[in-house]
Image (cartoon, helix red, strand yellow):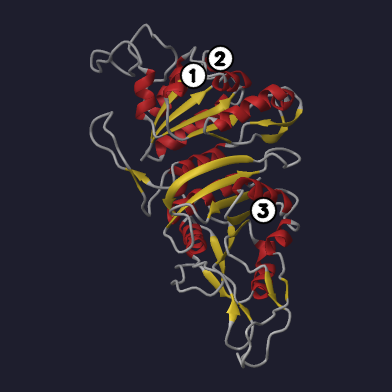
Amino acid sequence: MARILLGVTGSIAAFKACHLASDWTKAGHTVRVVETAAAERFVTPLTFTSLTGEPTRTAMFPDSPAVPGDVAANPAPATINHVRDAAWADLMVVAPASADVIARIAAGMADDTLTATILAYEGPKLLCPAMNVHMYDNPATQRNLGVCRDFGWTVLDPASGTLACGDTGHGRMPEPEEIERAAAALLEGGEVARGDADDTPTERIDGPESHGATASLPLKGLNVLVTAGPTQEPLDPVRYLTNHSTGKMGYALAASAAELGAHVTLVSGPVSLEEPEGVDVVHVTTARDMFAAVSDSFAAADITVMAAAVGDFRVEEIAPEKIKKAGRESITLKLVENPDILAWAGGRKRDDGSQVLCGFAMETEHLVRNAARKLAGKHCDMLVANDLREPGAGFATDTNVVTVLTPGGPDEQTPHIEHWDLMDKTALAKRLLLRLAALRK
């Protein structure tokens, strides 16, 4: 189970933080809430203390011990050390995050308990903005959110609808279920092994069980479509054009999606891997075969992940018999373009945002530039890029090192960019799937 710091700021959406604190505590996590002074005007510290069983942090220098119950029976120092809280936590979540606190995080301020704790914290962190639509759209807020992303924050975009002030637009804090899925993704879907001491260093262990939302099958009821492996384009009855993909990333995605409760269709090129348990597998050979299989399943898919390495070209005419050397010193092949499956899917997504599309890009140069072009050009909701020459990120490995891009604005020209360190492909698959689930509207 994980240790979560939940920062709550001054917003009418603070009541949703009660739901988060309660859900995570019931799931077995330890939750400590840090409230700003403005947040206390909406939800009292006692409410969070009652929900979590942990003292709510409200002041840098409290006047009395912050331990629930009888002080004599629960001796504690009269102050809360924000540095110790920061070292204690596996995850920091600020929900709701007001425009004021986002600005202070971006400026690196530490003028209250929450911002001081944030400045001392070094782990994964999730920011959930909630404010008036005009405040959210203000260039200063957008600049501050960009700075927060540069500082390593994952920003969960606000939802659209009627706001408390009466305006209509984006600015509503995402629902607790969406935040819980995003938090589970940042925790990488694994258990946290702990020692007895409060500050004992620990390590994360991946396993079949998972944190909070993952344990409750966050993809249950969803249809997930995954493509994997290479394609083969025949030259004659003997030879073919292909690439070095082994399908390991796609198969990890399919197996993880089934583990997380989804109904999974895996469209697989020729590989030497066992079929994942509980997954419907469609075996294909050529790019056109894969396109036909994807066409059959795409409309019903809620999440589509195109991890296959599809051949861009095929020979115009396949030789009916084996091509003989017969004294030739060279051979000329005329290649024609294969269907662009990712672009086809990007142009046919549902209009209501309930269908998300993720593409993959293997590059050898200009990684971010090429990936950003593909993200926008293929109308993806996420693009996962890796560098063939990066150690641990090439074909046939059990690990991956990726850069994750998501659209950055209405014109999708300035993507959000996150660099994820080396990790096992199964752990990466779970993290990507939970992030994609959180992107669905």
**Count of numbered tags:** 3
Residue 109 in the image: x percent, y percent?
A: 52, 16
Amino acid carrying mark 3 in the image? Gln
> What is the secondary structure assignment of the residue under circle 1?
helix
Query: Does the CB distance between marks 2 and 3 fall below 8 Å?
Result: no
289 vs 432: above or below = below
At 71% across and 37% down in the image, what residue appears?
A: 409
356 vs 17: above or below = below
Mark 2 and mark 1: Cα distance apart in space: 13 Å
Amino acid carrying mark 2 in the image? Ala
Mark 2 and mark 3: Cα distance apart in space: 37 Å
At 36% across and 27% down in the image, what residue appears?
A: 87
Q: Is residue 257 visible?
A: yes
**Quadrant housing residue 331:** bottom right
Residue 385 in the image: x percent, y percent?
A: 57, 51
Residue 134 in the image: x percent, y percent?
A: 74, 24
Q: Is residue 381 visible?
A: no
**Quadrant housing residue 392:** bottom left
Mark 3 and mark 1: Cα distance apart in space: 36 Å
State which mark lies toward you, 2 or 1.
Answer: 1
Tell me which numbered mark, 2 or 3, is placed earlier along the sequence.
2
Tell me which numbered mark, 3 or 1, is placed earlier along the sequence.
1
At 75% across and 51% down in the image, what residue appears?
A: 351
Along the line of sight, the residue nearer the viewer: 302 or 244: 244
Along the line of sight, the residue nearer the viewer: 325 or 210: 325
For residue 38, the mark is 2
State which mark lies toward you, 3 or 1.
Answer: 1
Residue 316 in the image: x percent, y percent?
A: 73, 79
At 72% across and 41% down in the image, what residue appears?
A: 413
Q: Which residue is mark 3?
A: 355
